[in-house]
Image: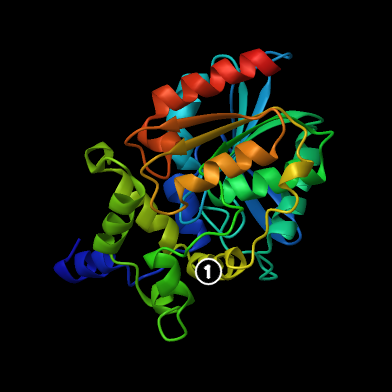
Amino acid sequence: MSLLNGFIRYMGLKKHSTEEMRSLYANDDSQFFSHRGDQIHYRVEGSDAADAPVIVMLHGIMASLQTWDGWVEQLKNDYRIVRIDVPGFGVTGAVSDGDNSIGTIVERLNALADHLGLSQFTLAGSSLGGYISWEYAAAYPERVKALILLDAAGYPMPLNWLMKLLTAPFLRHAVRIATPRFVVQIVLMDVYGNRKRISSDKVPVYQDMMLHKGNPLSLIRIFEEVEHMTPERVPQIKAPTLIMWGDKDSWIPPENAPLFNRDIEGSELIVYPGVGHVPMEEIPEQSAKDADAFLKRVL
């Protein structure tokens, strides 16, 4: 790689095509679901046993299905795992009609569940994925056997520095021009409770996901919707629910965790000391162990 190409790569000045993203991040477990003119990237992994419980995993903003690598490793022997690149992110990329509303993403998820013949399953969602998960559980209670929410969006919250930047009139489109690696590093340092837990391979993956052409605009649109989110449907959730939260979360305040716990009847809450916004990534072994213990009790 020439010095110039290295600089362009580091500064995130060149966007990746969908074909490039597939060559980098699709593997033998990858499949693509055609829906409304788009191709949703997902992987089906884990147990092939006919009676294996199914877990569908949804990641948060700027992330991808790779954020669940640790959980897949811990849970693959006992569960059939379906993890998805949420429309607008990851290898799935931007949706062709530009509709990134949560309601539409819920409907896309439901169409994929139909396609896979999933009549009932557990939903595990982190951050934005948590928002999608509880909205889905409220809309389709007959399909959700259990719900796991990790630092989920839903209740009003102050916008963090990145959200403020990406909703500011004169700065909101800067991410569409460049996504420098050092900025991605800063974001990850903000997301983790303990920066020493950030492995060196995480940064280029997160940067690539933001360099997929169209993904930055999806991020902007999602932030605009998050500003107007409402938790009014949370009390409608009837599925057994486990709420996980890092007490060092600087993106969605830990004070929101007991609000979910209060409004979802019979829910359980685990707060992890010293952990940030992504427990499944920062402490995968412990958080997966807790998820497994919960599911073995309620399924």
Res. 170 image quadrant: bottom left
Label 1: few (<14), some (14–19) or many (≥20) C-alpha neighbours in 10 Å = many
The quarter of the image holding the N terminus is bottom left
x then y, percent, for residue 144: 76, 33
Q: Is residue 236 visible?
A: yes
x then y, percent, for residue 132: 66, 49
The reply, left or right, for residue 205 in relation to residue 80 is: left
Front one among 215 and 171: 171
The quarter of the image holding the C terminus is top right
Q: Is residue 76 visible?
A: no
The reply, left or right, for residue 284 in relation to residue 220 is: left
The reply, left or right, for residue 58 in relation to residue 234 is: left
Relative vertical location of residue 235 with respect to residue 204 in this rendering, above or below: above
Res. 269 image quadrant: top right
Res. 266 image quadrant: top right
Q: Say which element carries label 1.
A: loop
Residue ID for mark 1: 214
Residue type at mark 1? Gly
For the point 45% across and 23% down, which residue is it? 73
Total marks shown come to 1
For the point 53% across and 47% down, which residue is it? 256
Front one among 228 and 144: 228
For the point 56% across and 66% down, which residue is it? 218
Relative vertical location of residue 18 with respect to residue 76 in this rendering, above or below: below
Relative vertical location of residue 81 with respect to residue 190 in this rendering, above or below: above
For the point 22% across and 39% down, which residue is it? 196
x then y, percent, for residue 190: 32, 53
